[in-house]
Image (spheres, grey):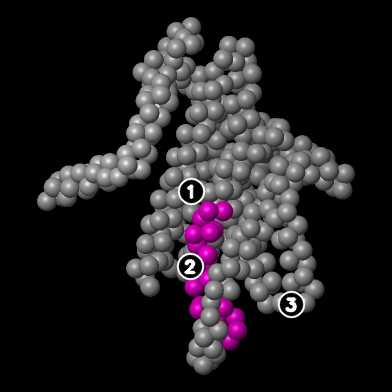
């Protein structure tokens, strides 16, 4: 039965592609694009490409994926020492486990404890484990941090803090607490009116004049908080949109039940607001994950910076295209995975309703 339904759907899809003159023209146009663009791309990237061996076997006719294999460790860890890479792996595993618990566990006490550890404790723990100097760990200066795992750690911690700060900003602005709400509005409008690149350069070049920079590693902290406050401004607006969608009847019902203002917000208003704002929040998460690659513009060796550094070597100069394609594919997989998780959570929300 399932096979028959699949055949029927396929037949209907093919018929809809040619049922009118316009649809036929559009279908033929896409077929032409497929033949002249997609087929040569597949031939260059897969059929005529070199996947193993040495660089001497690479030819201009096909892609040289040997570049990715030979530089895999640098693309993952940056210049972090190989014998200390377990520290980065441990942090990735720990943060992934915490995010998994927040996603799957329903007990509010456990989620609150894990969330507090992720937001408050993990940025500090991650810094000292990465930098070292404690418990006999070798000191690794921040200029050696980088690679894809740096992007993931940086994004996960920054987005987690951005969500909490954005939530607080949305509540303060929603309550209209005089000068405090005005300051929050000014902060949100200022951040949303500036490109992220300009803020990153501000953190790198301007802030050191206001704060004495005793260590190069402080640069990472400045970038981290600038990135966090940038995301928090957008998070605040997304959450505020959810709060404004809640009707006055919900507040009145909470008052009739005898709930305090805090209880009403905690147990009735905020859960509904977050459900409404959830698609916008997930869009921001995906956008901020991709924006983490902008760190390469301020001399941070994230995956893009590391790819540019490795492809600057004479033997790898002709293969920068392979590096960019690899980065694009990796981030497409990550963002597509997040979108699928988002869809699943949205379906669960609808079921609970």
* Distance (Cα) linking label 2 and label 1: 23 Å
Residue 196 sits inside the magenta stretch:
no
**Left or right: residue 13 compared with residue 56:** left
Instruction: Examine the structure image and report whether residue 262 is included in the region drawn in magenta.
Output: yes
The reply to whether residue 64 is in sight is: yes
- Residue identifier under label 2: 275
Q: Residues within 10 Å of mark 1 (few under 14, many from 20)?
A: some
Who's the residue at 38% across and 33% down the image? Answer: 29
Quote the CA–CA distance across marks 3 and 1.
Answer: 37 Å
Q: Position of residue 64 (x, y in %)?
A: 47, 17
Task: Choose the circle earlier in sequence order: 2 or 1.
Answer: 1
Toward which corner of the image does residue 163 lie, by quadrant? Answer: bottom right
Q: Comparing marks 2 and 1, which lies closer to the viewer?
A: 2
Mark carried by residue 96: 1
Q: Position of residue 169 (x, y in %)?
A: 67, 66
Give the residue displayed 28% in from the left and 41% down from the top.
18
**Which of labels 3 and 1 is toward the front?**
3
Residue interval drawn in magenta: 259-284
> Which residue sits at x=50%, y=79%?
268
Around disc 2, counting alpha carbons within 10 Å, would you say few (fewer than 14), some (14 to 19), or many (20 or more)?
A: some
Q: Examine the rendered structure and indicate whether residue 111 appears above or below residue 294.
A: below
Observer-nearest of 124 and 41: 41
């Amino acid at each position: 039965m399932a096979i028959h339904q699949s055949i029927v759907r396929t037949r209907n899809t093919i018929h809809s592609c040619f049922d009118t003159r316009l649809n036929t023209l559009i279908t033929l146009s896409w077929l032409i694009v497929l033949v002249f663009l997609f087929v040569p791309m597949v031939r260059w990237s897969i059929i005529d490409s070199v996947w193993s061996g040495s660089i001497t076997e690479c030819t201009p006719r096909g892609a040289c994926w040997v570049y990715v294999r030979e530089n895999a460790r640098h693309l993952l860890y940056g210049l972090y020492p190989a014998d200390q890479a377990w520290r980065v792996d441990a942090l990735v595993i720990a943060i992934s486990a915490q995010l998994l618990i927040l996603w799957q566990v329903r007990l509010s006490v456990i989620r609150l404890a894990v969330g507090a550890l992720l937001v408050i404790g993990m940025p500090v723990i991650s810094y000292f484990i990465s930098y070292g100097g404690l418990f006999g760990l070798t000191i690794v200066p921040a200029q050696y941090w980088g690679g894809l795992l740096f992007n993931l750690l940086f994004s996960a911690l920054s987005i987690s803090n951005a969500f909490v700060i954005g939530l607080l900003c949305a509540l303060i602005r929603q309550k209209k607490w005089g000068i405090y709400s005005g300051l929050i509005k000014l902060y949100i409008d200022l951040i949303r009116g500036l490109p992220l690149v300009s803020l990153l350069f501000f953190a790198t070049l301007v802030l050191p004049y206001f704060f004495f920079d005793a260590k190069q590693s402080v640069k990472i902290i400045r970038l981290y908080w600038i990135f966090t406050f940038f995301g928090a401004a957008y998070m605040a607006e997304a959450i505020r949109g959810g709060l404004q969608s809640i009707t006055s009847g919900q507040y009145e019902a909470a008052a009739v039940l005898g709930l305090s203002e805090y209880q009403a917000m905690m147990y009735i208003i905020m859960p509904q607001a977050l459900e409404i704002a959830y698609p916008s929040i997930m869009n921001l998460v995906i956008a901020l994950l991709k924006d983490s690659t902008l760190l390469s513009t301020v001399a941070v060796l994230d995956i893009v910076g590391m790819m540019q550094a490795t492809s600057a070597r004479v033997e790898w100069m002709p293969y920068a295209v392979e590096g960019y394609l690899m980065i694009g594919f990796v981030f497409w997989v990550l963002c597509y995975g997040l979108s699928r998780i988002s869809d699943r959570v949205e379906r669960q929300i609808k079921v609970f309703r």
